[in-house]
Image (tube, grey):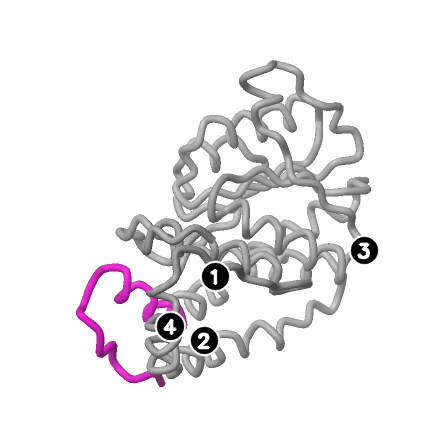
Amino acid sequence: MPQKPRLLKSELLSEIYEQPEAIRHMLKNEAERVAWISQQLSPREFSYALVAARGTSDNAARYGQYILGAINRLPVALAAPSLFTRYHSPPRLSGALVIGISQSGQSPDIVGVIEEGRRQGAPTIAITNDLESPLAQAAEYKIGLGVGKERSVAATKTYTAQLTALALLALSLKGSPIMLDPLEAVPEALALALNSEPEAQAAAKNLATSDHTVFIGRGFNYSTAWEISLKCKELANIQA
């Protein structure tokens, strides 16, 4: 297990250290529900996924492009929510599996994409931390993050939970038997990663003197390169 945080205690740092247990809890509580969703979707025809999200959730959606592509051979497009709400010109969603991702489930434009998906008869899934939220209520199916309230403005445990939810969905859609062994190893891997705090502090000291930085990633790490860039802007006011 990781050592207790040594930095000045904050809600952000506390939530970072909650991640291993939060992901373990989510897998335990949502695996059966996601397996059921995959069973309901199996007779329905869809040839691609359309994912609607904003901010950190949009970076999780980028991961969805890779995990659903690699495991399910499913093309994944990122929605332009303003087409649905601001410009009232939603695209035709024939053949789409429409997924909305939002930590709070309150974003009106993400809800709008899901509502339009249902209006057009597409299967819809909400991935959210609040199963009573407008997004969850709008979707035909819902996957709960269940990681507890995230008090810090900068998302941490909800981001990794969103990645886990997408991986859980991809593995479940692959068919029977559903092999979740790779995901069951994630909480311990997260716990081990948290032991790298001293190295993170050293890297932060080097970055602190910069006025801009570049993060590079590809494949399954592409989304997290975007997310780290967002964190630098949100937390350190560094152009990234």
Quarter placement of the N terminus: bottom left
Q: Can residue 166 be found in the magenta stretch?
A: no
Would you say the residues marked 1 and 2 are in contact, meaning their CB atoms lie under 8 Å apart?
yes
Q: Callout 4, which amino acid?
A: Asn
Residue furthest to the left in view is 8
Q: CA distance from mark 3 to mark 2?
A: 27 Å
Residue pictured at 43% horizontal, 83% vertical: 192
Q: Earlier in the sequence, mark 3 or mark 4?
A: 3
Q: Could you tell me which secondary element the residue under label 3 belongs to?
A: loop
Would you say the residues marked 2 and 4 are in contact, meaning their CB atoms lie under 8 Å apart?
no
Q: Earlier in the sequence, mark 4 or mark 1?
A: 1
Left or right of 151 on screen, residue 114? right
**Compared with residue 14, is residue 2 higher up or lower down, i.e. above or below?**
below
Would you say the residues marked 3 and 2 are in contact, meaning their CB atoms lie under 8 Å apart?
no
Q: Which residue is mark 4?
A: 206
Q: Earlier in the sequence, mark 1 or mark 3?
A: 3
Left or right of 116 on screen, residue 46? right
Q: Categorize mark 1 by other alpha carbons within 10 Å: few (<14), some (14-19), many (20+).
A: many
Q: Callout 1, which amino acid?
A: Thr
Q: Which residue is mark 1?
A: 160
